[in-house]
Amino acid sequence: MTVLVASDLDRTLIYSTAALSLTMPDPVAPRLLCVEVHESKPLSYMTETAAGLLAELTADPSVVFVPTTTRTRKQYQRIRFPGRPAPYAICANGGQLLVDGVPDRDWRRLVAARLAEECAPLEEVHQHLLAVADPAWLRKARLAEDLFAYLVVERDLVPDEWLKSLTAWAEARGWTVSLQGRKIYAVPRPLTKSAAMREVARRTGATTTLAAGDSLLDADLLLAADAGWRPGHGELADAAWTAPSVTALATAGVLAGEEIVRAFAQEAARLGRLDA
């Protein structure tokens, strides 16, 4: 039996300082391991316990760990996870499939063909974002892998009605809008983590898929997996979203990441005992 574990990264498995949610007294706060450095500064963390559990999980030859993220390939490759290097990684919300760190060209061609057929072009969406964003709260506008666009904003200043209007405009053109932290993503609807996860499952012969994620862009991934987990924070938690195969955790912040890795390990072990 091969178990595929596909996990979202930011605010699911790894956490910035702002997302740690260390609400407990300082003397009992968990020890943290830095897993990402950017511009010579520590950026993302796991608890040391979560890091140890992940190392044990990836050492199991029956488990295929697949980091699954909206990050670009360059952003993903800053992360240094403990344990065995992941043979596959899903970046750009499913637009890039990395095999031993190298982009799979055949997968990218398949994705490009589907986007051209099913949704409005990136340039149209990008120009609309620039036209309707308010300079009072817009900090940056970026394109990712020539696949989707996102804005870096002052979140508290972005009107709810503006976001609803953008969502309706995008949906009519085959795109999805997601607010994650200080970023507003506009992503083509056919660009999904679940499609890439299914491709990795096909290539590896995985018989069971496990997944975790916190945002609306992770909903398709969770629904496609045999079992999934979401933390007690993020877009999905805010919307009280769940599904029969998805466990909604109450824990928030970096301790939710630890609970998710523990759940992966326990479920993989249970499946291994059943297979034996």
Image: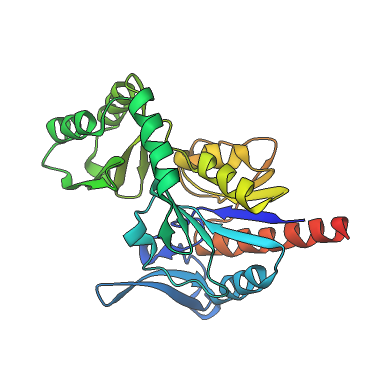
Q: What's the image's color scheme?
A: rainbow
Horizontal side of 16 relative to 232 (left or right) equals left
Q: Is residue 122 above or below residue 38?
A: above
Quarter in which the N terminus is drawn:
bottom right
Camera-nearest residue between 34 and 117:
117
Camera-nearest residue between 96 and 220:
96
Q: Residue at x 56, y 44 (%)?
A: 199
Q: Residue at x 49, y 59 (%)?
A: 253
Residue 228 x, y percent position in the rendering: 64, 46
Quarter in which the C terminus is drawn:
bottom right
**Does any portion of residue 188 appear in the rendered image?**
no
Q: Residue at x 69, y 51 (%)?
A: 206
Residue 33 x, y percent position in the rendering: 48, 77
Horizontal side of 68 relative to 143 (left or right) equals right
Q: Residue at x 51, y 44 (%)?
A: 196
The image quarter in which residue 272 lies: bottom right
Camera-nearest residue between 240 and 71:
71
Camera-nearest residue between 124 and 227:
124
Q: Residue furthest front?
A: 106
Q: Residue furthest top?
A: 172
Residue 232 x, y percent position in the rendering: 55, 50
Q: Is residue 229 above or below residue 85?
A: above
**Does any portion of residue 120 appear in the rendered image?**
yes
Label total for image: 0
